[in-house]
Image (cartoon, rainbow, N blue to C red):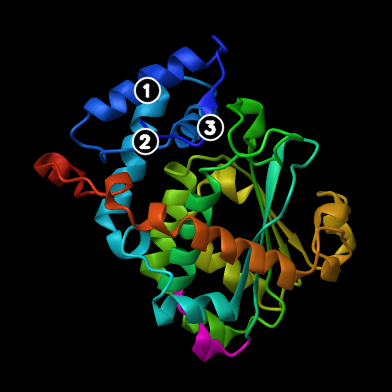
Amino acid sequence: MATARSCRNDSAWSDKLQELLAWFESNPNLPEKIEPIVMLRFLKCVQYDVEKTKPLVELNYSMRNKHAHLFIDRNMEDETTAKGLRVSDLLILPGLTPEGNKLLFFRMADLDPNTRNSVEETKIFFMMSDARFTMPDVEPKVGEGELGELDDSDIADGDVQIVDIEGYTLRHLAYVSIFVLRIYMKFLQEAYPSRLRAMHVINCPSYLDRLISMMSPFLREEVRNMIHYHTEGIESLYRQVPKDMLPEEYGGKAGSIAELKARGIQSIKEKSGYLIDERYWKVTSLSKSRWSWF
């Protein structure tokens, strides 16, 4: 199996990783290929439990194939996708928090409600995530480049999402697809190869209660308890995440939103061959019909 990074011989997890890679290749209900670092993310997500990793992997790909319009049918050259990238800022911030988590940042770049498209926004988020998951979450060590050894410490322990909803109105809510929201939240909570550690919602509007009531049916209790609503400025966010890791526009030192966004788009472009290669995503086995309830 091709990979950009080799596996370090660490008996704590590498034997489990090799076992899972062999299981994946022999499983007719899974795609043809998977990058080892992606499988390692699944394994780390469930505290290196092989038997818990297997159903997580199967659910991930079953949902992808059930909802191919969100997870498989994607093309950077598509004008609708290009528009989605222009009107939204979806950023993967560099580095890891002291707790070992990755910061993800989202906001609207265009406040016109007519520009919202739940399908494209969801598709772009998972394109960025899939591109990210093929690379370590920390910068390579000096002299290592991209061909260093695969090390589980290079992978985030989880994700922390920061969502800026300044300018969000009730008209924007009208453009949210409940069907897409349900799929997005189910995938994020149950099939995503990184644990959601927290979600911070900043610049909350006066109708926050309506927003919460719309999302609540799709959230497990443990996830609801992870969501922090910052209603009195951004200072409270600084007590939860390192200020320096935020974009410059939010008081941090990670770079401007324009720079960070350009870096993320470039990452998708560089991984476009991987992202559209159906051997990594599509399941051809007829037995996939058993997933119809997802």
The amino acid pointed to by label 1 is Leu
Q: Position of residue 209 (x, y in %)?
A: 63, 70
Which image quarter: residue 55? top left
Q: Secondary structure at mark 3?
A: loop
| Left or right of residue 28: residue 228 | right
Q: Is residue 90 above or below residue 225?
A: below
* Residue contact at pointers 3 and 2, CB within 8 angstroms: no
Give the quarter of the image for residue 231. bottom right
Amino acid type of the residue tagged 3 in the rendering: Arg
Question: Would you name the residue on which mark 1 appears?
Answer: 20
Above or below: residue 74 compared with residue 158: below
Sooner in the amino-acid sequence: mark 3 or mark 2: 3
Residue carrying label 2:
57
Position of residue 24 measured from the top left corner of the image (x, y, whole percent): 30, 29
Pointer 3 local density, CA inside 10 Å: few below 14, some 14–19, many at least 20: some
Residues under numbered marks 1 and 2 in contact, where contact means CB atoms less than 8 Å apart? yes
**Can you see residue 106?**
no
Q: Which residue is pictured at 55% across the width and 23% down the height?
A: 47
Residue in the picture at 36% in, 25% down:
21
Identify the residue under disc 3.
5
Name above or below for residue 263 compared with residue 53.
below
Is 112 included in the stretch rendered in magenta? yes
Span of residues in magenta: 111-118
Q: Amino acid at mark 2?
A: Val
Q: Is residue 21 left or right of residue 208?
A: left
Tell me the mark number nearer the camera, choosing from 3 and 2.
3
Q: CA distance from mark 1 to mark 2?
A: 10 Å
What is the CA distance from the residue labelled 1 to the residue labelled 3?
17 Å
Closer to the camera, 209 or 96? 96
